[in-house]
Image (spheres, coloured by chain):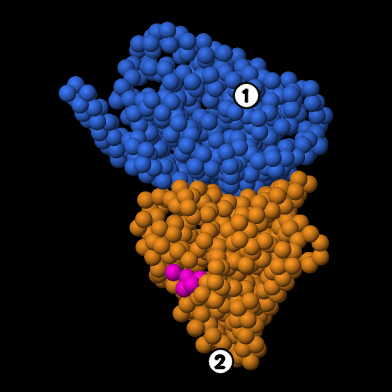
Amino acid sequence: MKAAQIEDRARMMSRLLVERYYRELDAPEFSDRKVVYLFTSGGIGEFFRTFNFRIVLPEINAVHCARAKISREMIRYGEALGHINEMCTYVKSDLGLMVGPPKGNAPFGKIPPPDLVVINHCGCSTYIKWGEALAREFNCPVQIIDVPFLSEDRPTESEHKYVKGQIEELIPVCEEVSGTRFDPDRLQDVLKLTEEAISLWLKLLQYGKKRPSPFDSYFEGVVYMAPMTIWRGTSEAVEYYELLIEQMEQRLAASYSPVGEERFRLVFEGSPPWPTFTRFKTMFERWGAVAVASTYIRVVCACEGLTWGPDNPMDYLADLAAQSFYNWNHLKKINFIENLAKDYEVDGIVAHSVRSCRPISIGQLDLRKYFATEAGIPTLFLDSDIADPRFFSSSQIRKRVNTFFEALDKRRKRAAEVKKA
Amino acid sequence: MPIARLIESIRQKVDDPSYPEIAEWKASHPGGKAIGCFPVYIPAELIHAAGMLPVQIAGAMGNVKLDEADGYLQSSVCSVGRSTLELKIDGHFSGLDGMIFPSVCEISRGLSGVLKRYDPDFPVIYIHYPQNLKSAYAKDYLVNELNRLKSVLENLSGNKITDEALLDAFKLYNERSELLSELAQFQLDHPERLSASESYLLRLAGVVVPAERHNAIIEEALKLLKDSGDRHPVRLRMVLTGAFCERPPVEMLETIEAEGVAIIHDDILLGQRWWVEKLPLEGDLISILAENYLHNTVINPVVFQPESTPCNHTLDIVERTKADGVIIASAKSCHPAHHDSHCIVRICEEHGFPFVRLEFEEDQRVFESTRVLFEALLEARERLPIAGTDKGNNVVGST
Ligand code: SF4
Ligand code: SF4
């Protein structure tokens, strides 16, 4: 069934929730609420929600700058501030927006300055420098939740205690900055909503196993993940994912595929080239290629197999943070992607490497080596950037995408001939 | 032997990527094992106490071509990350019996994973140091990490790490800290007799040789230096910051020094000078290591110390040493250094310190733009007073 035939209510809803999120950040009725800045990987916003903080996620601002096609300008402002070297372009873009001439006034909303910066150091060391820079610019306190990188498959007892302890230590800090007393019952309620939303979210990811997959886990998934990031621990998030599941059921009943006719099934690894996202999407769409599974949308704290639940709120929060996808070690990631490839019966893997984001990109070439040569799964490696459009070479990327699918096509035809023979 | 000859003899050896000293050490320590330590800091005391040789991984310095490594790591990875992998692939690490990667940044972390996959039989240990130094939970966590490392080292070496052996190692490394502090003080007080490039070579001598021998080398150097005369012209005294991990080519420092710019303080090979104060010798030794990591670590870009960031630290150093300016030298693609360089520039501007901002790579061979940059700095100095808050005397550049 064609894309236009089923209304994508979830996409619309996601957009409305994003708009509302930005509106509320600057709404007069919330102006007495303090502002906390957090990062996404390991970002346990629900904890801060219980202190009535307005939660700003600088990475999300950078995404929206890129989607609003102003990231190049923001990056230029960031560079004018002296951030001249090769570094994460999200940082340059965000500092350009917040400290440069716009002073937080973005087309998608006015971003309030922080009263507290919390660096959830979870898989990305740039968070530390970014958080420090923001705290320095806005002269506000900065705290850290240091989440040890998962050396094993799951957090060890010692890692867990350390993370949990740090979250507990933040309670008096949050109370002081926000002026709101910590309410354990409220935290538990909020976490129940988180758990509910996560279980719906994980259910959504399973739909990619269907043939055709009723949704694209990368090109649509990034839209669907927004509420999981900015509306954590709310009934809005739960309702949103209920709606999404309903929509998936409808699509399934109608044998709907987001590309019309599903020809190739892929796993996508890596973050999107935001400024050129639509152009990038078209390159795959025209081949009838669907990302039936992707890793980027797992950056939100919402993974399978957590040890704890809302009945042990602090343990649950620590577990959510520690098991974030970008905190996984290289072997765990490869293993996981290989399982995705098997379980979702894919034709190939696409790794999009981001020059300026090393936490996500390091190891991707090795990953290609492994999948393409050892595991025998065709793998396409592409290289551009997450926020700086100058690094996206359309013609080069298109050429590589086309060559990849031509090869997949040939491979498929050969296999069919062999079968016939 | 004059100091120049001692330094020259070190220079001959340090850039051999095959680490011949490992084989020498193994020949005199039958059954002994050598462990590679990725920068910046690894508790060498523990390795030593296990009867093993800690080998500081210090890059290939352009002595190997990064052919194979480029198939595993993108060009946006710093040179020390790529060259470490290349050295492994090319067989230069055949003398190593394992490697430890600390949690400096995602390069160290990612590389540890890539190496594990590349050679599953090669022991690779990753250790996460707490970034939340103030947390009451950090110490227990780190004690646990150190005990984990201890037992891995015991298994690898086949030796138990006894308290006695660890205490001896503490003493040995305390001695090294003391000698290196003396060396740094000499570099600061007498740049005309000991240049930074020489001081750097003397420290570099310690990346492979056992600490006992390194201590003897530094001791000898200090003795020779006392009787040495002026050998270097000094027109300007500057502090170098940002080269704490990937190490700059010695020639880069020599190019700067040839212009008459003395580097009186630097952060090169910072892992050797990790402790601010010597380690105490009484108490539970693993707890001492953990506590010192939390409270006695030198300020640096890869440990979160919000009250005393590398930026404020640079300001303190410049004021304490009465330096004429700052050289902000970051390895290309070293994000931690780049981030800090921004606020160091700002501090320099606020305080009117002349500064030069440059980028280097360990395999860099040409330093013409570095030379031009310092020439410009010296010219500007002749035209303008160096002290004060006049922003006009800043020279910003990047090579
Ligand atoms: S380096 Fe990557 S993970 Fe880190 S902030 Fe930038 S984009 Fe996000
Ligand atoms: S040089 Fe910089 S980027 Fe490279 S490993 Fe060291 S700290 Fe990380």
The C terminus of chain B, quarter of image: bottom left
Magenta stretch contains residue B20: yes
Q: Which residue is mark 1?
A: A231
Q: Nearer the viewer, residue A362 or B94?
A: B94
Residue drawn at x 49%, y 38% is A333
Instruction: Calculate the distance from the C-alpha at mark 2 to the C-alpha at mark 1.
Output: 71 Å
Crowd rating for badge 2 (residues with CA inside 10 Å; few <14, some 14–19, many 20+): few
Crowd rating for badge 1 (residues with CA inside 10 Å; few <14, some 14–19, many 20+): many
- The answer to whether residue A374 is seen in the rendering is yes
Q: Nearer the viewer, residue B257 or B178?
A: B178
Q: Do the CB atoms of the residues marked 2 and 1 lie less than 8 Å apart?
A: no
A412, above or below B235, in the image: above
The N terminus of chain B, quarter of image: bottom right
* Residue under disc 2 on the same chain as residue under disc 1: no
> Looking at the rendered structure, which numbered label has been put on residue B87?
none
Q: Position of residue B196 (x, y in %)?
A: 57, 76
The residue mark sitting in front, 2 or 1, is: 2
Q: Position of residue A47 (x, y in %)?
A: 71, 30
Please report, as a chain letter, where disc 2 is located. B
Identify which amino acid the numbered label 2 is placed on: Met
B154, above or below B176, in the image: above
Q: Position of residue A63 (x, y in %)?
A: 51, 33
- The part of the chain drawn in magenta is B18-23
Identify which amino acid the numbered label 1 is placed on: Trp
Please name the color used to draw chain A.
blue
Q: The chain coloured orange carries which letter? A: B
- The answer to whether residue A413 is seen in the rendering is no
Q: Position of residue B226 (x, y in %)?
A: 65, 89
Q: Would you say the magenta stretch is mainly helix, strand or loop? A: helix
Residue drawn at x 80%, y 29% is A182
Q: Which residue is mark 2?
A: B1
